[in-house]
Image (spheres, helix red, strand yellow):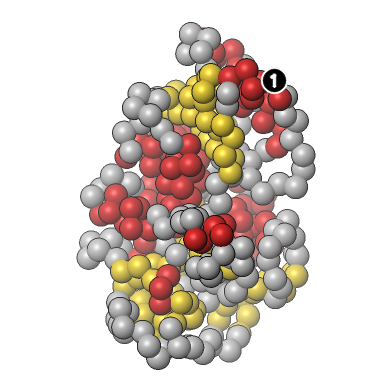
Amino acid sequence: MKAFQVKAPHDYQVAEVDPPKVAAGEALVRVAFAGICGSDMHIIHGDNAFVRFPRITGHEFAGVVEAVGEGVADVAVGDRVCIDPVISCGECYPCRIGRPNVCSSLEVIGVHRDGGFEEFVAVPAANVHHLPEHIGLDAAALVEPYTIAANVLDRMQPHPGDRLMILGAGVIGLTILQMALAKGIEEVIVTDVINERLVAAKQLGATQVFNSREQDVEKEVLALTQGEGVPLIADAACVPALLPQMLRLASPAGRIGLLGFSVQPSELVQLEVIKKELTLVGSRLNNRKFPEVLKLMASGQLDPLALVSHRLPLSDMPSAIDMLDHRPEEARKVLIQISA
């Protein structure tokens, strides 16, 4: 079968590989669609500290169950499904307190074990989520990015009337925007350096957008909030140098959600944190958010296909990577069609 395999940083190709075997407790899924994520790009570039090579990447995918292993009762051949990539042990401290997404022995499909950029993938049956009838397999491949958004918003604990600021209008920034609106946050500020992304954010419901390369974002946001600052700030830009600005723009008692995996240090002025009693929270992957996202998607409160700019066959993965590397303004979510 065909798969997109990363053998080592900057060494990747669409290749013929052996089909996976289905173990007890697993389901074999014929992958229909898979989305390219920024973390896939980090793996390709050697910037992901967690990956084990060689690796078939892809953690955003949906398809149809082809076979099930011994002991699987709740998943059947022919089921239309999407997959939660988070595999946890269920026994360590994070798992015991309901935080399996930071399990001490965490595995992520597409990072620690092979993922969705292949014709067939074997996954734990416990990670399979059935699709409501009218959610297409293309839309279902985008459930996982929305779980990232749901997770960071949950970590920031919004209060009624809170205003949200999102740094970065890439795909994750736009999923946070849609999720925030679905959860009842009425005012959302979005910043980016690419105007095409800001246009998309405005179309999807952002109340204010600012190009941080062309405008003084601090001046604009503080004027907009009468000097108070913003209660909720989500860092979807994932640029360590932006943390001091986030601290200055956060309101007293504000919460800042961090999503980046950079190993570069950020400058943190402790006075800014203490005088406002700010809360900085990390958010990794998702903590059992698939049912919530599927429910919102089924109700029409989320529009995943609005994020899709390109649909390409698996054979075009190298050209898609080149576009995302060198012409990011041309792309939002790139969806790879693997089977019909």
The reply, left or right, for residue 36 in relation to residue 41 is: left
Question: Residue at coordinates 67% horizontally, 49% vertically from top-left?
Answer: 261
Out of 165 and 220, give the one closest to the viewer: 165
| Residue 164, placed above or below residue 57 | above
Out of 292 and 210, give the one closest to the viewer: 292
Quarter of the figure with residue 291: bottom left
Q: Position of residue 63 (x, y in %)?
A: 38, 73
Quarter of the rendering occupied by the C terminus: bottom left
**Pointer 1: what residue?**
271
Out of 240 and 32, give the one closest to the viewer: 240
Question: Residue at coordinates 67% horizontally, 56% vertically from top-left?
Answer: 42
Residue 6 appears anywhere in the view: yes
Quarter of the figure with residue 162: top left
| Residue 297, placed above or below residue 255 | below
Q: Position of residue 183 (x, y in %)?
A: 33, 38
Residue 339 appears anywhere in the view: no
Question: Residue at coordinates 69% horizontally, 20% vertically from top-left?
Answer: 271
Label 1 neighbourhood size at 10 Å, few (<14), some (14-19), many (20+)? few
The reply, left or right, for residue 277 in relation to residue 310 is: right
Q: Position of residue 30 (x, y in %)?
A: 42, 79
Out of 275 and 208, give the one closest to the viewer: 275
Question: Residue at coordinates 35% horizontally, 68% vertically from top-left?
Answer: 129
| Residue 101, placed above or below residue 159 | below
Q: Position of residue 74 (x, y in %)?
A: 30, 78
Quarter of the figure with residue 191: top right
| Residue 330, placed above or below residue 83 | above
The reply, left or right, for residue 58 in relation to residue 206 is: right
Quarter of the rendering occupied by the N terminus: bottom right
Element assignment for label 1? helix
The reply, left or right, for residue 271 in relation to residue 256 is: right
Residue type at tag 1: Leu
